[in-house]
Image: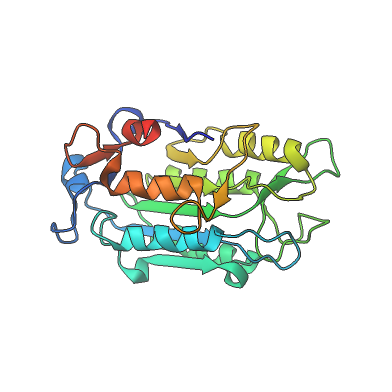
Amino acid sequence: MKLSSILTGFFLALIVCSSAAGQNKGVRSPEDDFLGFSGVTRAVIIGISDYLEIDDLQYADRDAREFYWYLRSGSGGYVPESNIRLLQNAQANFGNIWAAFEWLKDESKEGDRVYIYFSGHGDVETLTDAQNGFLLTYNTNKRVYPIGGFPLYMLNSYLNTLSNKEIQVFFIADACRSGKLAGGMDGAYQTSALLKKQIANEIKILSCEPGELSLESAEWGEGRGLFSYHLIRGLQGLADTNHDELVSLLELQIF
């Protein structure tokens, strides 16, 4: 499994994901000084291990918690708790996710930065030739994904809406984990391809390419998804190969 990042717009040359050593810098990190960032950071973080109808995962909810604590830490920019919506398991139903996205859109202004992190199942419906992709929320119907599933075309439209407001958008997905889902391996392929679709001025960091599955095991961090475990380690500084106390997307991708 390899880390895939899609860079668009003016972020291509300059974007820095995270400070590698910002613990003693107060609420401003070296990343902010480097980019001249003076806006507000907000995040919606979703992690679902225990599904209502669909096969459960093991560590997706823990991966979401770890990303939450990363953003709250100095290396993540000391994002205030009030600026983060963390939805796990039963909390991560369609209605709550929709409400969190509404909050993020309404509160964020030009020059702000948003993170959207999703750890859970992704799949496609098999009823139509279009095979529309979905992020599977807690209450997604296992036979009828449009009931409770969050459509990827709507997600891409939402990300585009944020970026059109000149908001810096980071979308991170640890989806397409193995499971007995309707679309099977072909569903994982289609979902990855749809997630990878290039949209406007946002950055996507995805756990797998089309044809790959995201892995999770007790082998990593006493129970983590492989992608999320190494993503956090890289953001915390292990990816900082030139030791400039900044982690670039290129460094993160190589790591």
Measured as percent of width and height from the top left, residue 90 is found at 62, 72
Residue 172 lies left or right of residue 91; in this view the side is left
In this picture, is 192 found above or below 107?
above
Measured as percent of width and height from the top left, residue 67 is found at 41, 57
> Within the image, what quadrant is residue 27 found in?
bottom left
- For the point 26% across and 56% down, which residue is it? 77
- For the point 21% across and 45% down, which residue is it? 31
Measured as percent of width and height from the top left, residue 180 is found at 76, 50
Near-viewer residue (104 or 224): 224
* Residue farthest along the top direction in this orientation: 13
Residue 62 lies left or right of residue 149; in this view the side is left
Measured as percent of width and height from the top left, residue 218 is found at 52, 56
- For the point 70% across and 56% down, which residue is it? 149
Residue 153 lies left or right of residue 46; in this view the side is right
Q: Is residue 208 visible?
A: yes
Q: Quadrant of the C terminus?
A: top left
Q: Quadrant of the N terminus?
A: top right
> Within the image, what quadrant is residue 34 found in?
top left
* Residue farthest along the front direction in this orientation: 219
- For the point 68% across and 40% down, which residue is it? 188
Q: Is residue 45 visible?
A: no
- Say how many tags the image has: 0
Near-viewer residue (57 or 26): 57
In this picture, is 239 found above or below 150?
above
In this picture, is 2 found above or below 44?
above
The structure's colour scheme is rainbow
> Within the image, what quadrant is residue 190 found in?
top right
